[in-house]
Amino acid sequence: MRAFFPNPPHFWRDRIQASLTHLGLSLGVAALAALLVFGVWYPYPYSELSGGRELFLILITVDVILGPLITLAVFNRQTKPLTELRRDLAIVALLQLAALGYGLWTVCVSRPVHLVFEYHRFAAVHAINVPEERLPFAQTGLKTMPLTGPTLLSLRDFKDPEEKLEMTVAALGGVSLAARPELWQPYDRAAEQIRKEAKPMAALKQRFPMAQQQIDAALAKHGPEAQGYVYLPMVGRKTFWTVVLDPVSLRVKEFLPLDSF
């Protein structure tokens, strides 16, 4: 029987215990990473409409599973001196932290940085889509991309037909108008245009009769005056949502997963 089972049961107990301990530590680090990603970089609803949740799940699934599995394979107190065992575990931890760091960097550079009113709609702008060489041409105070969640901006009017043509051609080539720093301006400067483009919530309910309960539930959180709110469509990374606004302050009140284009 020992020929078929050369290692005693405690050999596997030690490995499994070490692997489970590593798994617990990995889950703790993953929880801290989740606070950073979803609490700062991808607050709701950007965790969904900007792909933050999918990116993070891929990162954490690989990182959390890989480390404990390697520990399960290399942990052996019977045949390895303590110094060698510590070295192996240190290498595993460094590899795991390197993978986590690279994954978090990837999530960071893909993060949403601005929610931009783009003439007749909102668009979520992501750091990776902003041409960094154009940032110096942004207005004072708008030359950097925030690390603490998306901010509200709007786009200025085109200076002339030539600029409009240039920007439109670039947009057709993949650089959206909302991602052009030279067009950015403070959100409030587009107040008149926002009020002109926004539609009453009654129109949204009429377009989506099956979602009336969902819409009413979202508005109920803001009291009776919320019935007077307005909405505009929004473009995410791979999906379309709806932004609900206070018609007076034009502050964003709710996000709804409805394609209102």
Image (cartoon, rainbow, N blue to C red):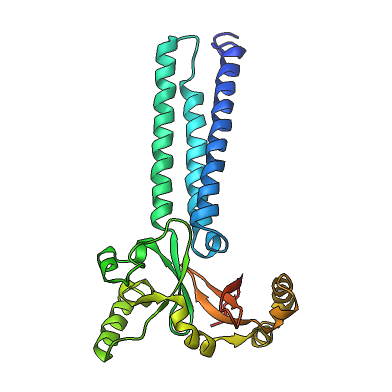
Residue 80 visible here: no
Numbered marks: total: 0
Residue 124 visible here: yes
| Residue at 29%, 81% in the rendered image | 167
Quick one: 205 or 172, which is closer to the camera?
205
Q: Classify 12 as above or below 162.
A: above
| Residue at 48%, 39% in the rendered image | 63
| Residue at 40%, 30% in the rendered image | 94
249 lies left or right of 177: right
The x and y percentages for residue 81 are 43, 9
The quadrant the N terminus occupies is top right
Quadrant of res 205: bottom right
Quadrant of res 211: bottom right
Q: Residue furthest front?
A: 140
The x and y percentages for residue 252 are 57, 73
The x and y percentages for residue 82 are 45, 11
Q: Classify 106 as above or below 241.
A: above
| Residue at 36%, 71% in the rendered image | 179
The x and y percentages for residue 54 are 51, 55
